[in-house]
Image (spheres, rainbow, N blue to C red):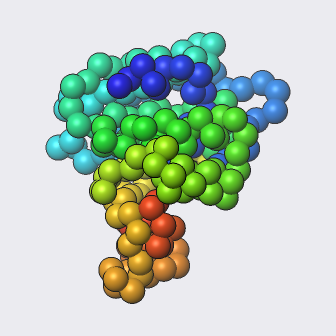
């Protein structure tokens, strides 16, 4: 399972594609700092047994903490301008891995989402009927928003009673009516 994550994934983006810094990249923080930041979107009760992936001095993806639990966390990628840490249920790994690979290959957010949806529709990519992702993202670690994403494939605003427009105060439904539909719950 984790071997999928170790091959060539150097840009960590899940919900929003952010441009890569041209030229010199930031150096990776210490392993301890990466683990602390990667775990930060998770409630305390879920942090035990979590696997954490981060980045080595050369920008390569490395295992920072082995885990046998239900959750895997990805540290912030120093090669990306903005700050993003993501934790996901292990059943979401194929989806997360594919999303990261598309971003690494240069796909912007709309292109990435279209490709993922086409692969879900064709059966090439399997997305569980539900799953949870915890994420913090923003300008940097100090200026970031947290959200919990609950994937409910094909959910609609009408069927769930959720807002279909972004909200910083209330849960809302993203990608409504698609296999990637998910409830975004602001945690800030």
Q: Residue at x 41, y 69 (%)?
A: 154
Q: Nearer the viewer, residue 170 or 176?
A: 176
Percent position of residue 60, x then y: 57, 17
**Residue 173 shown left or right of residue 44 in the figure:** right
Q: Quadrant of the C terminus?
A: bottom left
Q: Is residue 51 above or below residue 12?
A: above
Q: Is residue 74 above or below residue 92?
A: above
Q: Is residue 168 above or below residue 129?
A: below
Q: Residue at x 41, y 78 (%)?
A: 156
**Residue 106 shown left or right of residue 30 in the figure:** right
Q: Nearer the viewer, residue 169 or 69?
A: 69
Is residue 39 something one can see in this rendering? yes
Q: Is residue 14 above or below residue 185?
A: above
Percent position of residue 7, x then y: 54, 20
Q: Nearer the viewer, residue 113 or 29?
A: 113
Q: Residue at x 55, y 43 (%)?
A: 99
């Amino acid at each position: 399972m984790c071997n999928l994550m170790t091959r060539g994934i150097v840009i960590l983006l899940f919900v929003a594609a952010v441009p890569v810094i041209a030229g010199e990249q930031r150096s990776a923080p210490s392993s301890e700092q990466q683990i602390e930041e990667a775990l930060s979107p998770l409630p305390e009760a879920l942090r035990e047994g979590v696997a954490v992936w981060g980045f080595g001095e050369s920008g390569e993806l490395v295992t920072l903490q082995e885990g046998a639990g239900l959750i895997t966390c990805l540290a912030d990628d120093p090669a990306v301008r903005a700050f993003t840490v993501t934790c996901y249920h292990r059943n979401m790994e194929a989806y997360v891995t594919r999303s990261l690979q598309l971003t690494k290959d240069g796909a912007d957010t709309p292109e990435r989402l279209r490709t993922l949806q086409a692969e879900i529709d064709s059966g090439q990519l399997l997305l569980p009927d539900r799953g949870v992702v915890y994420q913090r993202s923003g300008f940097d670690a100090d200026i970031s928003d947290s959200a919990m994403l609950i994937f409910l494939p094909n959910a609609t605003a009408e069927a769930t009673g959720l807002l279909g427009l972004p909200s910083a105060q209330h849960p809302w439904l993203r990608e409504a009516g698609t296999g990637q539909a998910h409830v975004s719950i602001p945690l800030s």
